[in-house]
Image: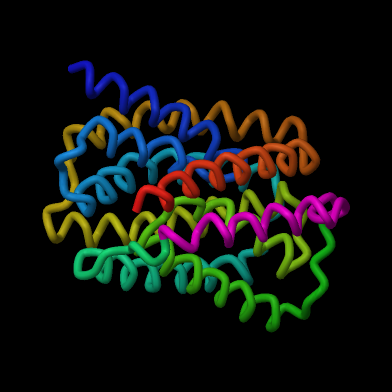
Amino acid sequence: MLDLLWVTLAAGLAGFVDAIVGGGGLILLPTLFAVHPSALPATLFGTNKAAAIGGTAWACSQYARRVTMNWGTLAPAAAAALLASFAGAWLVTMVPATGLRKALPLVLLVVLLYTLWRKDLGRVHAPHLSPRREALRGSAIGAGIGFYDGFFGPGTGSFFVFLLVRGLGYDFLHASAGAKLLNTATNLAAIALFAAKGHVWWHVAAVMAVANVIGSLLGARLALRHGAGFVRGIFIAVVSLLILRTGWDALRL
């Protein structure tokens, strides 16, 4: 019972952070691994996805009501993310993700340094590509990060946000809105694969999902109220914590 309480609290906090800028896996996955150290990694990944999809989808609906979503770009990007995530989730049931765990802190450090260097990055919403090129680039982002999310996952939302800002010219608020849609698609695909292989604890995921939705509701409202500058600040904080957490994990491998 105490174990369920800990992971439920973590799910609520993860939903709050994830709704603003992504990175909820920084909180929920390590908690699941700490509370259930003898469980199969694939089972914990699957349970995490099943718990997180409700909050991510809810946040997406909240953003869609207040922020203009470019469906011509985001719809094909979400489809690409879904298919690639399914492939990544299949692969993680076959091979370990050790190499990615070692490289992830360095990749995140590059993202952080670039964001700090470009102080104007993501403050103004200024898409600069033709509709066709934006859709193609968005789909490439969806496929690349979607595969990563299915295979490993931590920091997926933050990667989506960063690439939508850097690659498409979105501000952090619009990028966060788009990231929720793409992340919902990747979670859905991963859940389908993990569930088919019996790697989801549904009784645990159901309780965590309720807490995740509540946290997501609070986080989305805060982001929409305070805008792109606020989301950028939270993005920097979350990526910094991700670097510390994933760096510690990599040193222990």
Magenta residues (range)? 101-124
The foreground one among 180 and 26 is 26
Please state if 183 lies on the left or on the right of 229 as rendered: left
Q: Main secondary structure of the magenta part?
A: helix
Magenta stretch containing residue 123, yes or no?
yes
The quarter in which the N terminus is drawn is top left
How many numbered marks have been drawn onto this rendered protein structure? 0
| Colouring scheme applied when the structure was drawn | rainbow
Q: Residue furthest top?
A: 2
Residue found 32% across the figure and 43% down from its top: 48
Magenta stretch containing residue 122, yes or no?
yes
Instruction: Give above or below for 72 relative to 45.
Output: below
Q: Position of residue 252 (x, y in %)?
A: 37, 48
Instruction: Give above or below for 97 relative to 29.
Output: below
- Quadrant in the picture for residue 241: top right
Q: Residue furthest left?
A: 198
The foreground one among 52 and 248 is 248
Residue found 74% across the figure and 44% down from its top: 232
